[in-house]
Amino acid sequence: MYVAVKGGEAAIRNAHRLLADRRRGDRSLPSLTLGQIAEQLALACDRVMAEGSVYDRELAALAIKQARGDLIEAIFLLRAYRTTLPRFGYSEPIDTGAMQVERRVSATYKDLPGGQMLGPTFDYTHRLLDPSLAGDDAPDDPEAREGDGVPAMRVSDILAQEGLIEADGETGGEEIGDLTRTPMEFPMGRDTRLQALARGDEGFLLALGYSTQRGYARSHPFVGEIRIGEVEVEYRMPELGLTVSLGRIRVTECQMVNQFKGSAKAPPQFTRGYGLVFGQSERKAMAVALCDRALRADELGEDKFAPAQDEEFVISHSDNVQATGFVEHLKLPHYVDFQAELDLVRRMRGEHARKQGGDEAMPEAAE
Amino acid sequence: MATAHIVEGGFADPVFASQSVFRAVMDAMARPGSVLPIDAGISPPAPLNAAAAAVALTLADGDTPVWLEAEMAKNEAVAGWLAFHTGAPLAQMPSDAVFAIASNPAHLPPLTGFALGTQEYPDRSTTVILQMASLSDGPVLRLSGPGIRTTNSIAPRPLPGHFEMQWQAINDLYPRGLDLVLAAPDAIACLPRTTRIGNGEA
Amino acid sequence: MTLETEIEDGLASYNFAYLDEQTKRMIRRAILKGIAIPGYQVPFASREMPMPYGWGTGGVQVTASIIGPDDTLKVIDQGADDTTNAVSIRAFFAKVADVETTTRTGEATIIQTRHRIPEEKLTEGQILVYQVPIPEPLRFLEPRETETRKMHALAEYGLMHVKLYEDIARNGHIATTYAYPVKVEGRYVMDPSPTPKFDNPKMHMSDALQLFGAGREKRIYAVPPHTNVVSLDFEDYPFEIQTFEEPCALCGAHGVYLDEVILDDRGGRMFVCSDTDFCEERRAEGHRGHLSGEAMEAAE
């Protein structure tokens, strides 16, 4: 007896109820507060803000809670919310040179003005599970060093004094691209490309960055500097001729310094790969910097052969909200197309069987 | 002071008004030569007519430079009104315009002077809004092409000089080209670049 | 105030049809250029929607940009109104645009579809909005946008013909059964979305306006009414559509697209209309297929 599949609406409703139940989990345990997520899963919130392209820690915490800890789902929630926000304008470029640095390390100089500051890093922790964290032991208060919070000079400025590194690029003149407002077009400008990378999936960019270290477009990278800290966001109101501060955001900036042999136009010098990400995410900032440098192959007249150098490939596939949507859409019904394929395969098998001499019955001849 | 003229006379309910005007423009573009009424209840400063203004308010914004034919550009009320209600910057050259509005088609520069798109991006072309005194009592244009079952006809006036010859030149550029919105005070009709104009005899 | 109540108070309510007006204007401009250049893919700054990319975000953005309070919306997926994604999208518009919805093809002013064109002939004034996953018909022959854009610019479609001809050489058939490429008004080769090629002839000289939205790939394109849409083929291998040997088991219709339904684990199967509305209306008119006894009706 055939009963057509009906009741999609009820099925969806019930599925969502079950989801809400599983999200909450064991009712005898207290529900997570957004404050707990924002404070204690701060790096998860940072990633969701960065790839969700919205700097709002509380909304990121809400998204993480709603997504049951699935960060890509949380990123998606934030992006979908972002889309609906009215746009008042563009901020002034942030000045990371004026950053209140909480962490700042350079791999290229032993010591430098402003010093090396480890800050809150996993580096040099021994990765041993810590049983004390199973409870609620309060850690010791951190110690603050005299002079913390003083702006530290950029490593790239040190190299620039000798003319050893390419200039920082020009700002002004041309309008900065915005891929959330204008359709992407290849080849892209470096501005739009960096925007795409900043929103890109950490895992994907990490793998691509890694591939450049293993010889797929090796760029001899050195971490000129990584800095993490707060910067001021300013907005200029042209009609009032006024620049106002909108607040402070935490960002991670990575400047990679890469060898460059020089070309007909430019003498041998160091070049840069640049990464800037919302929140504290060194891994992402470094991966972006490696990819940025690899993607400058055309600009610097380098041979192009590796995936990380291929702008269309990298940028078209770096967005995890797009990627997860399209991969997961395969679970939607496709039976209309599949029927068309079934029909063709059956027909071709029938012809194949006839060609083979006919008498040997094909399995589906028993139908 | 002219401020009141600039601020008043826009859509009373922008969300629904622009939706209904857009549907008329879309319908008109999809069925070239069909005349669709526009009643958006707006009162732009003269010489901008209500239908042309409604189309501009529906489609133009800060991302779309608008070029105004000289007579309109000189008119501070019109320029101010459009700037206030759309936020669109004024295009200096016809070739920079996403939209162009002309109240006096006789003074229009050659159509080929507007943005015509490129072979790769033919969509990057101007949509020209020509104000018409009438869509029915001018010389008859016989139309054919996509959107038209067999033929259609329309009789707009006043058209730019040597219009049929100019339009033939646009046809010849396909897929580059531009698209026209003919705006009588209370109705519009469209001629997309694919529409061919035959002679006026039935 | 706690963080939680602060957020509850702060989350904005949504605009009519979800999209903000600036986004609608951007999409509306793209739609108009799409109509003016039939078959050409207009790039647009696609937005994130509250459903995933690949699940109809392009179609949803197009529908959201054209729909008004007077519209009646029908949403189908695989031809059916009651497939989960169709239900979900219909519910979305019922909620954010408060429009009337219908399952009747004839009553709808806008029909959003995934993978099918309704069997009932569409009429003047109706708009068919397709959800498109990969809008570029040349994409699987040439993955680079920079290259395919050049091919369209030059109307250089030899590669597509070579691909179709290779199929014939290898299989004796053109092995493309859905998303079968068409040429629009003699100029642009266009992907009709993954509809079965059975539906291709319905696109030709349709009375309805056809709009295509690809959200993830950020393209909108269109076919105006009464426009030439020709499936690519060869003189010695003309385009042909699928035919089904038996009629619909429920309504007895011939010459429609059928879904194969597996009835048991012994190879039992039946073929029924993929267009559920078409099938239901025929049965309401008294048509019966060989498996639609009265018991069957009662069981539904």
Image (tube, grey):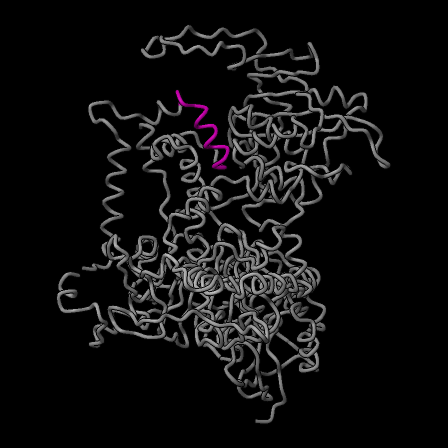
Q: Quadrant of residue A147?
A: top right
Kindly give the residue lying farthest to the bottom in the view shown: B202
Does residue B185 lie above or below A212 as drawn?
below
The answer to whether residue B9 of the structure is visible from this angle is no
Picture residue at 47% right of the left edge, 37% below the top: A52
Residue A164 position, x and y percent, is: 80, 23
Residue A11 position, x and y percent, is: 24, 49
Report whether A204 appears left or right of C267.
right
* Residue A176 covered by magenta stretch: no
Bounds of the magenta segment: A39-53
- The quadrant the C terminus of chain C occupies is bottom left
Residue C135 position, x and y percent, is: 53, 57
Picture residue at 75% right of the left edge, 39% below the top: A299
Q: Nearer the viewer, residue B161 or B69?
A: B161
- The quadrant the N terminus of chain C occupies is top left
Does residue A38 lie above or below B77 as drawn?
above
Residue A67 position, x and y percent, is: 36, 35
Q: Nearer the viewer, residue A145 or A211?
A: A211
Q: Quadrant of residue B79?
A: bottom right
